[in-house]
Amino acid sequence: MKTAVEELSPTRVKLTVEVPFDELRPSMDAAYKKVAQQVRVPGFRPGKVPARIIEQRFGRAVVLEETLNDAVPKLYGQAVDEADVFPVSQPDIEVTKIDDGEQIEFTAEVDIRPNFEVPDYQGIEVTVDSAEVSDEDVDAQLDALRQRFATLTGVERAAASGDFVVMDLRAEIDGENIEEQQASEVSYEVGAGSVLQGLDDALEGMSAGEEKSFKTELVGGENAGQEADVIINVKSVKEKVLPELDDEFAQLASEFDTLEELKNSIREQARRNKLIDQVVQAREKALDALLDKIEIPLPDSALKAEVDARKHNLDHQIAESGLSRDAFFRLYQTTEDERFEEFDKNSARAIKVGFVLDKIVKSEELGVSEQELTNFVVRRAMEMGVQPNELAKHLADNDQLTLAMVEIVRDKAKSVLGDAAKVVDTEGNEVDLKAIYTEINGEPPVEEEEAAAADSDEAADKPAEDKAQA
């Protein structure tokens, strides 16, 4: 087989592949067997029709077509390896010549990862947040803990922001009750920001036993988008009461006997979290700094596929929410146009990140051990709330183990970048990542514990298709 490469653009090539007929022999033998199974010839059992009879009765073209259907995809894969190109789209393949018994020729146009060099990343300077834990940090954690153990107490007054009400709701359009727009004994925190516009304003100042109506746009169901009268009947008003900060609270909320012991534990955990954040920030900022040094043309097909995948995921989220599109975007305090602009920006960055990290993976000869793959599956299964063996089977059955391994080695490439960087915190102190690894895990490098924290940071930049499949 001989392969010629023509560069159509920095992101697209045309492969012209010439293949001697001898190399088609395995596919041709398989084609005869397949056709023999499909045809019926008197005097011959299915699958036992000789090749010469098949050609006489049905023509050699049938066999050649089946041969090419089997051989060309395999030959294309070999041509890609031979040409040392990295396809990022499905190829446009055309068989351009068939010299029966001599050779065939086909062309394949495909978008590829462009050629570029990764600059030296040793000593890239990055600044991360300080790992110092302030009293305010501890107080914030304590307040969050108090919120979890808060109680609701009924009050004989009008509802205010932060109070909880129990209410019945119903909706009417032109005086006609909408059956599916009714709910009883709904508990709601006033001021929480309902997708039902006007609800919070209507509730403030209402007392138990009062009824009020307001006009708004319905956000779900068959009448989504229509204006309706929503009638609220407040059954009760309750205020949130936080527990006192004392030793009794420490015993209620933790395994500690005193508030001081609880505070010390929170302070230590906060410091640990900040150390992990420093590692994550160092890797992400080193990657950002490296990306700023590289101009990479992006294949249009890859960019379009990435944007389309993100839009598809968004449509799925909206459908699952049961809300109208307007209500969905209102809930997340954004607009469809703003979300699409984010998709364009994040998709371009995600593709560029993948290209750069893959280059580092290759240059650093990074691989994936069986234990690392197992750890990845276990961690991801915990995040998804499924059994690890179920997730492993799903990945294997859907040919997604390769995607998992790509994610693992790309994370390793980020680790390489972080470790090569010169890291200081906002106070000007040098940050030793290897010392952090040792303090947290006892040995370098930090991978599992901090990788989970990194997942949320890189979610916006991970290709949507990868996320959906993984």
Image (cartoon, rainbow, N blue to C red):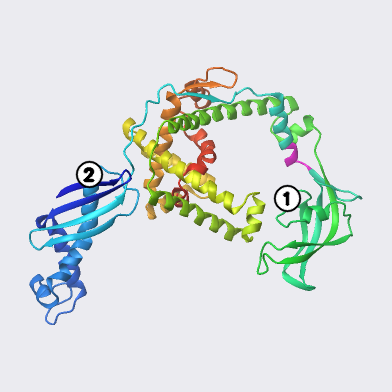
Looking at marks 1 and 2 on the same chain, the residue that comes earlier in the sequence is marked by: 2
Q: CA distance from mark 1 to mark 2?
A: 57 Å
Towards the viewer: 257 or 153: 153
Towards the viewer: 451 or 107: 107
Magenta range is: 145-150
Identify the mark at residue 108; answer none if there is no mark: none
Q: Residue at x 33, y 54 (%)?
A: 90
Tell me the quarter of the picture where residue 198 sits: bottom right
Main secondary structure of the magenta stretch: helix
Tell me the quarter of the picture where residue 318 sits: bottom right
Label 1 residue SS: loop
Task: Report the amino acid beneath label 1.
Answer: Gly
Residue 401 is inside the magenta segment: no
- Answer with left or right where residue 61 lies relative to residue 129: left
Picture layout, residue 278 above or below residue 165: above
Q: Nearer the viewer, mark 1 or mark 2?
A: 2
CA neighbours of label 2 inside 10 A, class few (<14), some (14 to 19), many (20+): some
- Answer with left or right where residue 411 lies relative to residue 66: right
Task: Report the amino acid beneath label 2.
Answer: Ala
Picture layout, residue 167 above or below residue 32: above
Residue 343: horizontal and vertical position, in percent?
51, 48
CA neighbours of label 1 inside 10 A, class few (<14), some (14 to 19), many (20+): few
Q: Where is mark 1, residue-wise?
A: 193
